[in-house]
Image (cartoon, grey):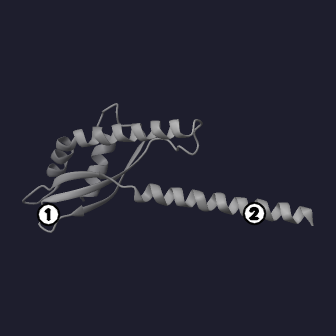
């Protein structure tokens, strides 16, 4: 429920111009007493591998992601208020936001595997032509 409400709040109730790209709530970890919730966000602004400029483009992407994360963190009280309206509990959990790098690392790994596979295929084609 917390994951759904936070995701809905970020996409529909935050009008901060610093929020750019796609924000996904990947997971929520609740404390045993349900008073705190660690919310993990994946933020995708641009794919640095598809951009021109190498490291400069990657740094710009990281800056945009940091601004988006700061904007969401800044709106924590608004998101928590929306959560309190939806929950039917004695306490509303205090939200703590974190960036989730797992999904991004998985995508990077998949891209590396695809690149290695295409290089291997190209090598096989080149060797086949030489025979």
**Quarter of the view holding residue 21:** top left
Vertical placement of residue 58 versus 114, above or below: above
Front-most of residues 49 and 5: 49
Looking at the image, the residue that sits furthest to the right is 131
Side of 117 where 104 appears, left or right: left
Mark 2, residues whose alpha carbon is within 10 Å: few (<14), some, or many (≥20)? few
What whole-number distance in Å separates the C-alpha atoms at marks 1 and 2?
A: 52 Å
Disc 1 element = loop
Disc 2 element = helix
Q: Position of residue 24 (x, y in %)?
A: 37, 51
Identify the residue at image location x=53%, y=43%: 48
**Quarter of the view holding residue 120:** bottom right
**Which of the numbered marks, if any, corresponds to residue 121?**
2
Identify the residue at image location x=46%, y=58%: 105
Identify the residue at image location x=39%, y=41%: 65
Vertical placement of residue 27 versus 71, above or below: below
> Can residue 48 be seen by looking at this rendering?
yes
Which one is earlier in the sequence, the residue at label 1 or at label 2?
Answer: 1
Side of 127 where 49 appears, left or right: left
Image quadrant where one finds the N terminus: bottom left
Circle 1/circle 2 CB separation < 8 Å: no
**Which of the numbered marks, if any, corresponds to residue 34?**
1
> Can residue 13 be seen by looking at this rendering?
no
Front-most of residues 19 and 91: 19
**Which of the numbered marks, if any, corresponds to residue 73?**
none
Give the foreground label among 1 and 2.
Answer: 2
Side of 23 where 13 appears, left or right: left
Identify the residue at image location x=41%, y=59%: 102
């Amino acid at each position: 429920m917390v994951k759904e409400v936070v995701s809905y709040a970020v996409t529909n109730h935050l009008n901060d111009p610093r929020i750019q790209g796609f924000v996904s709530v990947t997971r929520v970890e609740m404390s045993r007493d349900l008073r705190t919730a660690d919310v993990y966000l994946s933020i995708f602004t641009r794919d640095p591998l598809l951009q021109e400029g190498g490291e400069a483009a990657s740094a710009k992407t990281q800056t945009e992601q940091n601004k988006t994360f700061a904007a969401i963190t800044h709106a924590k009280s608004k998101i928590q208020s929306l959560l309190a309206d939806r929950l039917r509990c004695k306490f509303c959990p205090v939200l703590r936001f974190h960036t989730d790098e797992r999904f991004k690392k998985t995508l990077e790994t998949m891209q590396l595997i695809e690149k290695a596979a295409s290089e291997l295929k190209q090598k096989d084609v080149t060797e086949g032509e030489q025979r």
